Image (cartoon, grey):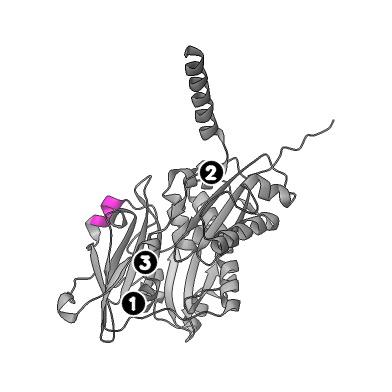
Amino acid sequence: MKTLFRILIVLSFLAIIFFYSSGSDNYELLEGPNSTSQIIPKTEGEHEISQDSLPRPETGLSTMIGKSSEELLKLYKEPNRYDQSVYGYQWWVYNQDPSRYMMFAVNTSGIVTQVYTNAKESDISPYKIGQTLEDIYSMTIIESEVNASIENNIYTFTMSEEDMNTRILTKFDNIFAQLYMDSENGELSGIRYMDSHTLVIHRPYEMSFVGELLSPPSPTSYLIEESNKASAVQLNDLLNVFRLNNEVPSLMEDESVNLVAMQHSEDMYTESYLSHESPTKGSLEDRLENEGIVYENAEENIATSYIDAIEAVHGWLNSSTHRNYMLDEAYTTVGSGTFVNYYTQIFIEKENEEIEE
């Protein structure tokens, strides 16, 4: 009996070691808020329509909302990249200077409907990247429910307790701001200004409505493919701006690693799972080896149910394990892949090359 008891203790000890030392299966899995957000139709009597709002900023990036693409070109010249989106707009991306990284959404009518940045040098009046949550609460009208009106339709967005601390929605006259907070240091890490239409088609929070339910356009397969490619590049862009903000060297993009990441996102979508272990292609180590990628160390962030790359990256930043990979100085190379609403980002530490004398 004593021998059996000792064997059980040893087996338990080995199981614990295996659990904490085995690969990707023990990583955190991140599922965004859109996986549980509800859309609730209501009658007109159930809705509170009037709501206080702040005056619209007179300076900064938010002033571009509602302006034409011609006005955008006059101020900022040609963007470095045009990225497709499945929401009926095109992202104009200005990434030449990461310290002033900007993304403007331009709809099919040539009107700017949205702007996003996570760069410290960008003018996001009345806020600043790095501003504390306490300071933001002191200067902002923040309510758990925010109303948006489009013609005779009223849409109400309800924030959870977590949203009120990490993903705040506030109103400035006829535009809205999503304030993305860094949960680790309690500071503003990014901001998205948008019009009512964008907010409603994104549905980033639980939403109730009176009137017509406004839905995003139905994208073609070509547009979905182009949007997937664009989203993957944005994941890399946003990561490097966050690394710059945290005084960590930027990562080089690697096409072969991008391919591995994209294939994993597509596999998760097709097979309906969220895991670092593919039922067909194995672990991250297996997948990198299959592409002949040589490395010293590798880790991977995955996520699903976020509306776009912006929300996915902020979700990773606010999760300790994912954040550690994003800001680890040991990594030199990155590859990202998106398929619909599945996101994968792989971090690579290259093997040290031996210098022969």
Give the main secondary structure of the magenta stretch.
helix
Residue position marked by numbered label 3 in the rendering: 204
Residue position marked by numbered label 2 in the rendering: 25
At a point 53% along the width and 54% down the height, the residue shown is: 239
- Can I make out residue 350 in this image? yes
Judge by depth and name the residue closer to the eye, 252 or 64.
252
Q: Which amino acid type is shown beneath numbered disc 2?
A: Asp
Q: Which mark is residue 171?
A: none
Span of residues in magenta: 132-137
Q: Residues within 10 Å of mark 2 (few under 14, many from 20)?
A: some
Quarter occupied by the C terminus = top right
* Whole-number angstrom distance, CA of label 2 to CA of label 3: 29 Å
Mark found first going from the N terminus, 1 or 2: 2
At a point 51% along the width and 34% down the height, the residue shown is: 19
* Whole-number angstrom distance, CA of label 3 to CA of label 1: 12 Å
Nearer to us: label 2 or label 3: 2
Q: Which amino acid type is shown beneath numbered disc 3?
A: Pro
* For residue 299, side relative to residue 146 (left or right): right
Residue position marked by numbered label 1 in the rendering: 196
Kindly give the residue lying farthest to the right in the view shown.
357
Nearer to us: label 1 or label 2: 2
Q: Residue 323 appears at what percent x and percent y?
A: 47, 46
